Amino acid sequence: MAPITNKKTIFAEVPSGVPEPGKTLKLVEDKIDLEAELKEGQILVKTLSLSLDPYLRGRMRPAGTKSYVPPFELGQPIANFGTGEARPVPHLSPDDRQLTALSPQVLKSANASIKQGQHVYGSFPFAEYNVFSKEEASRLRILENKEGLPWTTWVGAAGMPGQTAWHGLRAIGKPQKGETIFVSGAMGAVGQMVISIAHKLGLKVIASAGSDEKVELLKKEFKVEVAFNYKTVDTEKILSENPFQIYWDNVAGPTFEAVLNTIEPRGRIIGCVAKQHSNDYNGQPYGIKNIFQVVSKELLYQGFIVLNHPIEAFYDEVPKWIASGEVTKPKEHIYKGLDNGESFNDLFTGANFGKAVISLE
């Protein structure tokens, strides 16, 4: 078989503000030979879904700039959580293809458990096909998908955003049945799952979003007790009229100030700000003027990086909840195929509605 086209979205230029489609990110075409012999431990994977998340903007920085995740490499595909299907290696015999999607040598390695046709989850370069090294393959998680969830859901509600909501709410929020939680940025990927899990745990929910359409969805489909458009109403007034003990912070800025003034004493604040308050990433960070409320009210404010925490129990619980309807089915904004970064840019303009994900099925 002759080499086929393998589309990729690469990091082309460090942005000074919001990424520009076709400039910061570019769609390029490469070639891949699906029959090429693999090195020991490698696997060939067809990408099925890729997650789009605001934190990726933080990786679009100059090389050498330190953070909790490394910067993207110029000229190379960006990467994020994805799912894919392990493909057979054409040079293996039919019998061997039933055993593994790896080269013959890897049958003796630690990666031999990844079989032909199995689905995997992990960090995926934004490409239609990827060859993972032995080390990279060892970090992929095999998804049995007994729940029958769409592959897009495995990078959303059943993936990192869901893990973030599940861990942060339980470990930091320490919710007690009957309490109330306020969730900002509520129609985002994480916000939706925070609401759903909070309801399952017996909490009441206050939620804010940036459009009347999103507010209606929060009320009708997510059964949020108090939902409002922060662009058209006074956030602090709403919060002062509805006592709450837990705040899930997705946005920081003036909303955080309003929370400090209204949250109950000894309240818990979960820091999960996905992007700095200024969407253009320019100018001075927003300065909180009433930070002493943290002291006077004896508040807890704690941030976290979900990748640093165990999440095995998440897979035992949350995918089943989603499949059974025990939590509200999350909304997904699905983009078909790779692009020049238009889909990623929508995260910063509010154009997407729900969890943004790329489908390559």
Image (cartoon, helix red, strand yellow):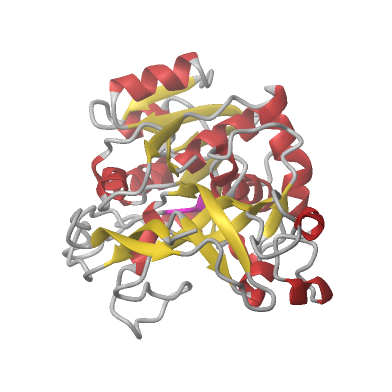
Q: Position of residue 164 (x, y in %)?
A: 58, 50
Choose between 358 and 295: the one closer to the eye: 358
Q: Position of residue 217 (x, y in %)?
A: 42, 19
Find the residue positioned furthest to the front: 1
Q: What is the total number of numbered labels drawn onto the structure image?
A: 0
Q: Is residue 135 one of those drawn in magenta? A: no
Q: Position of residue 174 (x, y in %)?
A: 68, 46
Choose between 130 and 192: the one closer to the eye: 130
Find the residue positioned furthest to the top: 220
Q: Residue at x 23, y 71 (%)?
A: 14
In magenta, the rendered stretch is 269-273
Confirm whether residue 62 shows in the render: yes
| Residue 268 as seen in the image, left or right of residue 318 | left
Location of residue 103 (image quadrant): bottom right
Q: Position of residue 170 (x, y in %)?
A: 68, 47
- In the image, residue 253 sits, relative to residue 361, either above or below, namely below
Q: Residue at x 34, y 43 (%)?
A: 255
Confirm whether residue 78 shows in the render: no
Q: Residue at x 44, y 76 (%)?
A: 70
Main secondary-structure element of the magenta-colored stretch: strand
| Residue 26 as seen in the image, left or right of residue 162 | left
Q: Is residue 270 one of those drawn in magenta? A: yes
